Amino acid sequence: MVRIPPVPLDALPPDLAAAIERGRRSRMLSTSLPVQVWGHRPEIAQAWLATLEAMHLRGVLDARLKELVRLKIASITTCKACQLARKHDAVTDEDIACLNSDHARFSPAEQAALHYAELFAGDYMAIDDSVFDTLQRHFSLPEVVELNLFCALMLAGGRMTYVQQAYEDPP
């Protein structure tokens, strides 16, 4: 059960309601419930969604890679909403079943990003220069920066959603 009462959709400011609708249409959001909780601070919720939208729609990273990273972080944060949602069809159930950075089904770039996500969410003190050297062999500097920002948003969002219990139970 949600720990902070969500703001009803029809009580949200029009700009925030429109951002939620855009997010649902683009599959950036799988549910509106976390954003309805954030709706108690609509201007901050709007800024969070704008950042997510920029990465989701105009990011420099491949959509499949972001989806793999998002799901890896969701497995670490145990965010039910994040684990159940699918943001891109290029990631299969088979990918999810073996979502490890050393699995041969993933490209070297995907392995590097998954390894970084594992460390970012689970053992950030182990991230050293060699991890960044590996990332820079596979990604441009803007892509590395976006990967950092994306991991941070996914980690924070997943933890926040879990702590607030702001997710719907699966059918």
Image: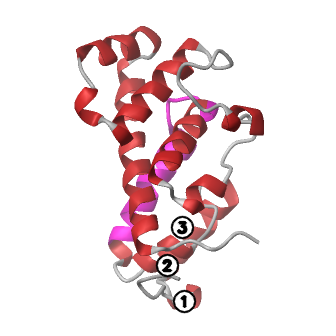
Is 58 inside the magenta-drawn segment? yes
Q: Are marks 2 and 3 in contact (CB under 8 Å)?
A: no
Percent x, y for residue 11? 51, 91
Q: Nearer the viewer's eye, disc 3 or disc 1?
A: 1
> Which three-letter amino acid code belongs to the residue tagged 3?
Ala
Residue at 36 percent of width and 40 percent of height: 122
Question: Within 10 angstroms of label 1, few (less than 14), some, or many (20 or more) residues?
Answer: few
**Depth check, front residue: 130 or 33:** 130
Task: Mark 3: give few (<14), some (14-19) or many (20+) Cα within 10 Å.
Answer: some
Element type at marker 2? helix
Whole-percent x and y of residue 41?
A: 34, 78
Can you identify the residue that label 1 sits on? 8
In which quarter of the view is residue 45 placed?
A: bottom left
Q: Which residue is mark 3?
A: 19
- In terms of sequence position, does the residue under pointer 2 or pointer 3 come before the other? 3
> Residue 125 placed where, x, y %?
22, 32
* Callouts 1 and 2 close, C-beta under 8 Å: yes
Disc 3 element = helix
Image location (x, y in percent) of residue 4: 41, 84
Residue interval drawn in magenta: 44-64
Give the residue at x 61% y 35%.
63
Left or right: where 49 falls relative to 105 = left
Local SS, label 1: loop
Which picture quadrant has residue 66?
A: top right
135 is within the stretch colored magenta: no
Between marks 2 and 3 in the image, the one whose residue lies nearer the viewer: 2
Magenta-colored segment: predominant secondary structure:
helix
Judging by the rendered image, the residue that carries numbered circle 2 is 36
Q: Nearer the viewer, residue 166 or 125?
A: 125
